[in-house]
Image: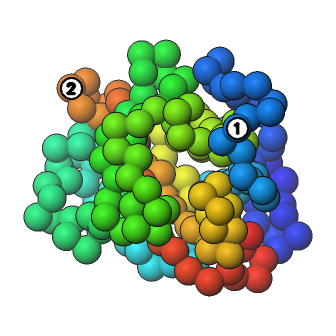
Amino acid sequence: MRASSCGRAILPQTDMRPPSMGPAQDPRRRDGDKPFVSDPELNFWSARPRAFAATWRARIPAGLTIPPRQVFAPESLVEFLPYLLIVEMDETQQRYRNRLVGTEVVAHAGRDTTGKWFDEIYSEATQYGHHRAHQWVLQHRRPLRVHGTMAYVDRGYMAVESVVVPVSLNRPDSIEQFMICVAYGDLQKNDI
């Protein structure tokens, strides 16, 4: 891990590309498309992802390291629901699909990607950024802050910050899905 120019930790750029990624001349690529920046130290600039990370921590049952998704009842997440994504992975843990995409996420992206595999909707560079974040969470079993811009949907002027947290489904303490809480805002100096 190294520090960025603003003193924040940046994950090393290891090659963790999933085998499903397409050729370098990807037709889904956008101008300015680049991977997101990962921040394991969780230096949030937005209150929403920070609060969701705290909610995740508070719901970890005694004796476990990650909570089951069942403890996140929709009625207890009202302020987060429009900004949530639930991402599932295939059995190889190398391919990801949006199981649920909140209404504000859809509105900001200008498209609904519910039920879509990442390799169907994202460029190679964007997939790589998501893949790195998910693999880090799988390895470290804790939340990860991810930030950048929405250049991947031609909205490079819009800053995006999220927290990626692991959850189990049917096997206690096994990571089977990710919940992601997103915030949008103006570009912050030293954050992009």
Residue placed under numbered mark 1 in the picture: 27
Q: Dot 1 lies on which element?
A: loop
Asked if the residue at tag 2 contacts the one at tag 1, i.e. Cβ–Cβ closer than 8 Å, the answer is no
For the C terminus, give its image quadrant.
Answer: bottom right
Location of residue 62 in the rendering, given as x and y in whole percent from the top left corner: 24, 44
- Identify whether 55 is placed above or below 86: below
Q: Dot 2 lies on which element?
A: loop
**Front residue of 127 and 66:** 127
Q: Earlier in the sequence, mark 1 or mark 2?
A: 1
Residue 68 numbered mark, or none? none
Amino acid, disc 2: Asn
Q: Is residue 79 left or right of residue 11?
A: left
Q: Is residue 8 left or right of residue 54?
A: right
Name, please, the residue furthest toward the front.
27
Residue placed under numbered mark 2 in the picture: 170
Location of residue 102 in the rendering, given as x and y in whole percent from the top left corner: 32, 59
- Identify whether 67 is placed above or below 148: above
Which residue lies at the image location 65% right of the left edge and 18% below the top edge? 19
Amino acid, disc 1: Pro
Q: Nearer the viewer, mark 1 or mark 2?
A: 1
Which residue lies at the image location 15% right of the left edge and 58% below the top edge? 74
Which residue lies at the image location 43% right of the left edge and 56% below the top edge? 111
- Would residue 105 be visible to someone looking at this image? no
Q: Quadrant of residue 130?
A: top right
Q: Quadrant of residue 94?
A: top right
